[in-house]
Amino acid sequence: MTTTEYGLRDTVNDTVWQGGDLTDRYLNGVRGAIPLAQTQMDTMRRLIRWSQEEVALVLDLGCGDGILGQAVLDQYPAARGIFADFSTPMLAAAEKRLAGYGERVTLVQVDYGQQTWRENLTGFQKTCQVSGFDIIVSGFSIHHQPDGRKRELYAELYDLLKPGGIFVNVEHVASRSKWGEMLFEEAFVDAMVAYHRQNGNGQPREQIAHELYNRPDKAANKLTAVETQCDWLRDIGFIHVDCYLKYFELAVFAGVKPK
């Protein structure tokens, strides 16, 4: 396993995830409560299985601790993976999770909010002797970018894919109304309460809700409707674009680069 670092931006929204406390709180206290998390993972794997036969190289963009990319590597034992994130604590968590994968894994600290971020992947592609990625996955990460950058990034991912390659985004998306947003928040608080009860945390529901509504990373979210993002993918040239799973503000959407 190798790790490479590149310069990162220094803004309030972008640095919030550089804190170890917030990273630990998310990985250990929030992610396990995400509704339908296993169904999201199963949907991702099914989309990949239907679109890919042989896989050489995978990119997990905004990888966090690498849970999505790990699932892909397990599905394709001959594949290698690049795990990219700008958060030092997240990459440390990914290194721990992926310790047993050896040379199949490369960790890259890079800020894909900058248009030059792709230059940092060229060397890794040459090392793997491939011209592009078979699979690009991302989980709850791209929603931190403003709309203009999201759309640019999707075009950049299209260019990085091999013909026939697939992009799958497991993402937090915007509700169409305040009513829908309130429904999602209530459902997520319920899931958080159930998760904490299961793990022996006796915090009252009101406290869990207060911490969720006032979490320090909330200001970094720039949510966009999944329908809008799917339209962007189609405009870029992706085919088979659809939202394949949606639960309030949680969505799995994907597109394939034509052969």
Image: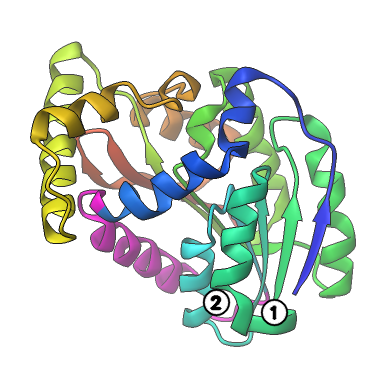
Residue 102: image quadrant is: bottom right
Relative depth, front residue between 26 and 253:
26
The amino acid at mark 2 is Leu
Residue depicted at x 60% and y 84%? 100
The amino acid at mark 1 is Arg
Q: Earlier in the sequence, mark 1 or mark 2?
A: 2
Q: What residue occupies the far bottom of the structure in this picture?
A: 77
Secondary structure under tag 2 reads: helix
Q: Is residue 111 above or below residue 174?
A: below
Q: How many marks?
A: 2
Q: Which residue is mark 1?
A: 104
Secondary structure under tag 1 reads: helix
The quarter of the picture where the C terminus appears is bottom right
Residue 80 location (% of width, % of height): 68, 76
Residue depicted at x 15% and y 58%? 200
Q: Which residue is mark 2?
A: 73
Membership of 188 in magenta stretch: no
Segment tinted magenta in the rendering: 33-56
Question: What crowding class fits label 2: few (fewer than 14 Cα within 10 Å), some (14-19), or many (20 or more)?
Answer: many
